[in-house]
Amino acid sequence: MNPTLEPEPLCERDDVDVQTETRTLTRTEFETARDLENHLTIGVANDAGEVLLVTDGVRGWTLPGAPVDPDGDWDGIARRALESLTGVDADIAEPVRVRRVEFRREGDAGRQRTTYDVLVRTASVPGRPIADEPTVAGEDVTDLIWLDRVPEDASDAIAADIRSILERAAE
């Protein structure tokens, strides 16, 4: 397993933005949170300074992402997700951000569950590649777009992620 995208070591790096949040939940909420998956968010920019966005019908246009099992290969998942969306085999350029959310059960400080969302940036890809049948984690993706800006209706967190990829693509 390639440790470059593993969340815990990334949290120790000075060049990665680490966002930590703690949520105290009721027993029922905590049971639901125990089933939440880790997540990998993939920032793909092209040589024209555009970023690849997908829509899931709920959050609007956002960076593509994939779930990661507790023992999953973060680097392998990033590469497969990129190739399944674009048809391109590109390198992961850098980890950008780790969002760490710790769920604690109300009244029982010993019961906790931590999830991670890691944002990575890939190497720049040429043109506007989209795979013939784009998928992420085995699910068909029908709505993809290349944009050179943050969509107006993006939530603050999604907008910040898109902006960070666009800024790095411009460097």
Image: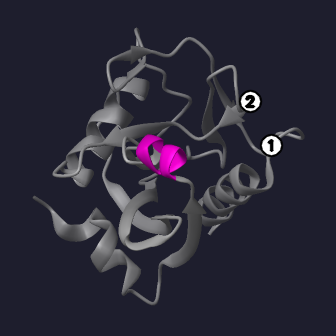
Please report the residue visible at 30 percent of the width from the left and 74 percent of the height from the top: 8
Q: Which residues are magenta?
A: 27-32
Q: Tell me residue 101's x, y (percent).
A: 50, 64
Quadrant housing residue 54: top right
Kind of residue at disc 1 = Ala
Please report the residue visible at 37 percent of the width from the left and 47 percent of the height from the top: 34
Quadrant housing residue 110: bottom left
- Residue 67 is labelled as none
**Which residue carries the number 1 mark?**
154
> What secondary structure characterizes most of the magenta part?
helix
Asked if residue 163 lies in the magenta stretch, the reply is: no
Quadrant housing residue 87: top left
Work out whether residue 58 can be spotted: yes
Q: Tell me residue 83's x, y (percent).
A: 32, 31
**Which residue carries the number 2 mark?**
60
Q: Tell me residue 140's x, y (percent).
A: 44, 12
Q: Tell me residue 39's x, y (percent).
A: 41, 47
Q: Residue furthest right?
A: 152
Work out whether residue 43 can be spotted: no
